[in-house]
Image: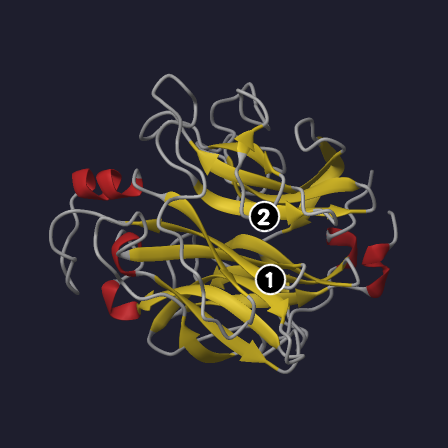
Amino acid sequence: MGNRIYENLLPAPKNGGFKMDGYYIWCGSVVQGEDGKYHMFASRWPKEYGFAAQWLFNCEIVRAVSETPEGPYTFAEVIFERRERSYFDALNQHNPSVKYWNGTYYLYYFGTTYGGPIPAVGEKISQERDVEVWNRKRIGLATSKSIFGPWERPDAPLLEPRAPGHWDCTITTNPSAAILPDGTTYMIYKSREYAGSTLQLGVARAPRPEGPYTRMQEEPIFQFDNPDFHVEDPFLWWEDGKFHILIKDDFKNDSGGVTGDWGAGIYATSTDCLQWDISNDPKAYTRDVLWDDGTRTVQANIERPNLLFHDGKPTHLFLATGNGTQPWDFEGNTWSMVIPLKKTVSEHS
């Protein structure tokens, strides 16, 4: 099995995607709205807060719009406001993933809330507080009949962690859903057993996109013998009678992971969303980017893959990125970039 994403990558528009002066942009999920334009849902927080733990306390989800899939996208609005702390997503929202099915837009995301003051610009966040709030991540699902809202925001998480003793007892986060034609929805999520343990992925299923969701098996998918093989940032879709996934190769301690290239995307397929066949050529993309002006750069990070579809076929790959000499050491703002795919991506490789 070849890698039908990597084989069809085109040069990335250097002036495409979504950038905002003064803000870190992360994630980036795009859908065509009822107005015919392209709408990106992304995470942002002010650059003055820095890229470290502050994103977990001060992020919000925004919508940006473009006439074309490539962009550039222009900021349109903030989707959610902060609210009373008793709600699971009261003070922070992140990692949007937007879908459209049967007349409704579904915006999957995760949120956090926390005790104590909201951290100020320049305030150092202790490791203890960072871990405590990180463990409060919960998946939410907002819905709207229009891309312009209003969005019906949930009072409770879409999927809660399980009790201690399970591998996913700390958090539910990084949702990616595949909505089948009849509405049956499969959702992959991320969790782990305790702070610092291996990040793993689980899968839940529901009769409709809004739930209720039931875990499909006790154990995580993509289990590896080497504990330094980490995968995260799933993007799941259904096409041609099977499931497809992109995930980040987030290996630790120079273990090499699946691809041997840290931060690269892994491509795999499945007939049941449980047992996955990783491509013989597993790299779907790497941090080495060819731009449409002929230049190449090795990006500090390439994260949070999302695909745009036309007639059920992927046409554009969106990725969170930033320039820099090493991972997480960004020179300037981060942004959501886009890589067009060749039309032949719809063909089986």
Sequence-first tag of 1 and 2 = 1
Q: Please give the residue where the numbered disc 2 appears in the rendered image.
A: 209
Amino acid at circle 1:
Thr
Residue contact at pointers 1 and 2, CB within 8 angstroms: yes
Q: Kindly identify the residue that appears in the image at 77 percent across and 58 percent down.
A: 312
Side of 90 relative to 28 (left or right)? left
On the question of residue 263 being in view, the answer is no
Number of residues whose C-alpha sits closer than 10 Å to that of mark 1, classed few (under 14), some (14–19) or many (20 or more): some
Q: Where is residue 266 shown, x and y percent of the image?
A: 64, 42
Task: Decide: is 227 above or below 53.
Answer: above
Number of residues whose C-alpha sits closer than 10 Å to that of mark 2, classed few (under 14), some (14–19) or many (20 or more): many
Side of 310 relative to 35 (left or right)? right
In the depicted view, which residue is nearer to us: 269 or 337? 269
The dot on residue 290 is none
In the depicted view, which residue is nearer to us: 86 or 115? 86
* Secondary structure under the numbered disc 1 in the rendered image: strand
On the question of residue 219 being in view, the answer is yes
Q: Kindly identify the residue that appears in the image at 56 percent across and 39 percent down.
A: 188
Give the distance between the C-alpha atoms of the residues marked 1 and 2, in whole angstroms.
10 Å
Side of 126 relative to 313 (left or right)? left
Q: Kindly identify the residue that appears in the image at 67 percent across and 79 percent down.
A: 36
Task: Decide: is 196 above or below 57.
Answer: above
In the depicted view, which residue is nearer to us: 196 or 74? 74
Q: Where is residue 9 shown, x and y percent of the image?
A: 73, 60
* Secondary structure under the numbered disc 2 in the rendered image: loop
Which quadrant holds residue 66?
bottom right
Amino acid at circle 2:
Pro
Q: Which image quadrant: the N terminus?
A: top right
The dot on residue 104 is 1
- In the rendered view, how is the structure colored? secondary structure
Q: Where is residue 148 shown, x and y percent of the image?
A: 51, 75
